[in-house]
Image: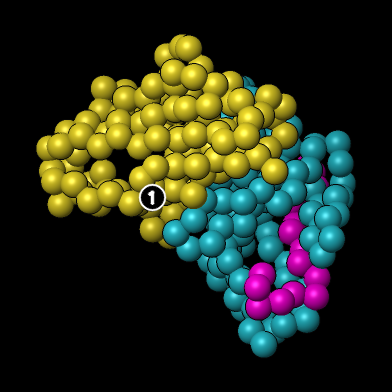
Amino acid sequence: SQKIEQNSEALNIQEGKTATLTCNYTNYSPAYLQWYRQDPGRGPVFLLLIRENEKEKRKERLKVTFDTTLKQSLFHITASQPADSATYLCALDRGSTLGRLYFGRGTQLTVWP
Amino acid sequence: GAVVSQHPSWVICKSGTSVKIECRSLDFQATTMFWYRQFPKQSLMLMATSNEGSKATYEQGVEKDKFLINHASLTLSTLTVTSAHPEDSSFYICSAETGSYNEQFFGPGTRLTVL
């Protein structure tokens, strides 16, 4: 089965800095990888999807990279704000049935003023 | 954007009773819905895949007779936790896909507490 590791449980950074979150996986390479934001007591909210043939994708202050050789994805939030504080989850497709996702435990990001 | 709702948002029940959770796609038709469970500080664990008009596909280790899933229409899937026990207390979240497999839209979750 797929194993997903997100670099740390918690990451604390100062407002304005760039937050970098890591997602590593083992076993098979997924067709695509997704990043979600989850606030306490809420369901995840989709942020970005990157496919196996894409190296990088951007959306406003967000950037995702995907290195299938390293089996790693990096998720960057530039010019971070306290409102970015949340848990960020990476998810990989299961490779067999479309839509079935493996989720990492998440990294809890805190941006302090 | 696509909106998924869940009802109830939280429920407390006695051990041995059954609880039904509804998941609705409000502004799109979802041929496939997914049910997840999340324990504190843990990742979302997929329980089952629900397809409209057919039986749900359960993940390994999930008891299909305990977690009954019905996907009666393209906008509604229900999860019934039968004979609930305290260890079933968790955060249950559904999601729906729009047809392309690019992204899933998640409901706000249902907090179940079994006394």
Q: Chain of mark 1?
A: B
Q: How is the image coloured?
A: by chain
Across the whole image, how many numbered discs are drawn on residues?
Answer: 1
Q: Is residue A70 magenta?
A: yes
Residue topped by disc 1: B9
Left or right placement of residue B80 versus residue B107 in this view: left
Tell me if I can see residue B60 in this picture: no
**Magenta segment, which residues?**
A67-84
Image x and y of residue A22, in percent: 68, 59
Image x and y of residue A7, in percent: 61, 62
Q: Which chain is cyan?
A: A
- The residue located at (85%, 50%) in the rendering is A57
Q: Which chain is yellow?
A: B
The furthest residue to the front: B27
Give amino acid for label 1: Ser
Above or below for A27 versus B56:
below
Above or below for A80 versus A61:
below
The 10 Å Cα crowd at callout 1, few under 14, some 14 to 19, many 20 or more, is: some
- The residue located at (58%, 66%) in the rendering is A86
> Secondary structure under badge 1?
loop
Image x and y of residue A46, in percent: 66, 48
- The residue located at (40%, 35%) in the rendering is B22
Left or right placement of residue A19 versus residue A5 in this view: right
- The residue located at (49%, 34%) in the rendering is B24
Tell me if I can see residue B29 in this picture: yes
Q: Is residue B68 magenta?
A: no
The furthest residue to the bottom: A113
Quarter of the image where one finds residue A109: bottom right
